[in-house]
Amino acid sequence: MATGFFGDIAPIRYEGSTSENPLAYRHYDATRVVMGKTLAEHLRPAVCYWHNFAWAGSDMFGLPTFERPWFAETMAAARVKADVAFEMFSLLGVPYFTFHDRDVVPEGASFGDFTRNLAEITEYFQDKIKETGVKLLWGTANLFSHPRYMSGAATNPDPDVFAYAAAQVKNALDATAKLGGANYVLWGGREGYETLLNTDMKREINQLGRFLSMVVEYKHRSGFKGTLLIEPKPQEPTKHQYDYDVSTVYGFLQRFGLEKEVKVNVEVGHAYLAKHSFEHEVATAASLGILGSVDANRNDLQSGWDTDQFPNNAAELIPSMYAILRSGGLGNGGFNFDAKVRRQSIDPVDLLYGHIGGLDICAQALLAAARLIEDGKFDAFLSERYSGWANPKAQAMLAPDATLDGIAARVGAEGLDPKPRSGRQEWVENLINRYV
Ligand code: XLS
Ligand code: NI
Ligand code: NI
């Protein structure tokens, strides 16, 4: 029961790196095994609903450029949208999808309408999931598009907006649970401020902490088995967002005693906006034990915006893939393509090209990182750099009974005189590039 939206395009297959077919994978061989898992199991790739099926191609200056048969605020249109969406997931052969409540149904005239619509499409999705085998990587609530959220959701000065947001998250969590979602994401798109002149920051952050604590409590009571994830972003749409970056989120979680309950969904473009690299954010999350999932994309580094383009540079992704593999993988998480085709890419096939390229780049980077690990040269370089710490006297300095004056006495007694050693950055950069 094809919708006809993609014409006669056949399912996308892996054809190897010499293939000239633009509608084939050249690196993403889903069943290929590296380091004990298939590429599909490592990457757990997901297609998102919003950029592909909800966004119509408008920008700050221009009207929508995409014409889609499902662009209407009705439940009939929502079902057409779902038909095409699941057809695309199947054509691409991706195992997962992601959505916001507002991507999949119209709000209707009241919260009751919204609740009923979401429940209805959830049942429709259940059939689609059964039919196609495509699963839900995560669900989320859109707490940023509607004007009621212009001053924040959980951090709004109006308690009724806080209540509305809580109700929306409850429904979205229920839908995610019903669909067997592996995770639930909270992205605080408007949880921040435009100006401190109208903002009580202390109060707002406390509201956000209470809100998240209730989400955690409800998760356990309602029996949702997935992982809760916060998606950090420093700004955009607001001037400043409280979930600034991975470190900031960790501090926030610790303050509210939630660091064992919530992990992070790290987005490439958001890392750049925070003036970090993606590998910095991944490595930080891994080192704190809160690496949950990835929103794969890239920004146009000239524009300074979160342009959500598809990944297109495998070499650049290797250090992040290395960090992910070294930390034992993403577990429940995956690689969600939070990426959209440009507004001039108006044809259905463009949606496929975007994902084929993005998935191939991620596969290429992951394979390169696996070779890097299996080869052992890089790990040998790293462990050699820190090898002095294997010395018992070095270890003793890290023991709880070590003291500053004790160490000072040893420096004098042994006449320590450490000599600078090269960090070998260029050597190691050259090494990494050999694996692309
Ligand atoms: C926006 C965010 C958003 C989240 C889900 O910048 O990336 O798309 O992933 O709400
Ligand atoms: Ni995202
Ligand atoms: Ni984003």
Image (cartoon, rainbow, N blue to C red):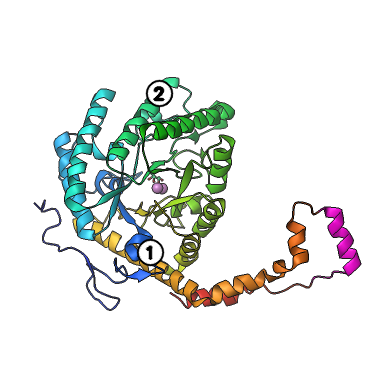
Residue 215 lies within the magenta run: no
**Helix, strand or loop under label 2:** helix
Residue 362: mark? 1
Q: Quadrant of the C terminus?
A: bottom left
Residue that mark 2 sits on: 163
Chief SS of the magenta region: helix
Task: From the top left corner, tell me how far across and down residue 83 is, in percent.
Answer: 16, 47
Task: From the top left corner, tell me how far across and down residue 349 is, in percent.
Answer: 20, 59
Q: Is residue 71 visible?
A: no
Query: Upstream in the sequence, badge 2 or badge 1?
Result: 2
Q: Is residue 40 visible?
A: yes
User: Which range of residues does the magenta coloring cover?
Assistant: 403-418
**Amino acid type, mark 2:** Ala
Residue 67: mark? none
Look at 58% across and 41% down and name the residue there: 251
Q: Is residue 174 left or right of residue 128?
A: right
**Of residues 131 and 161, which is closer to you in this image?**
131
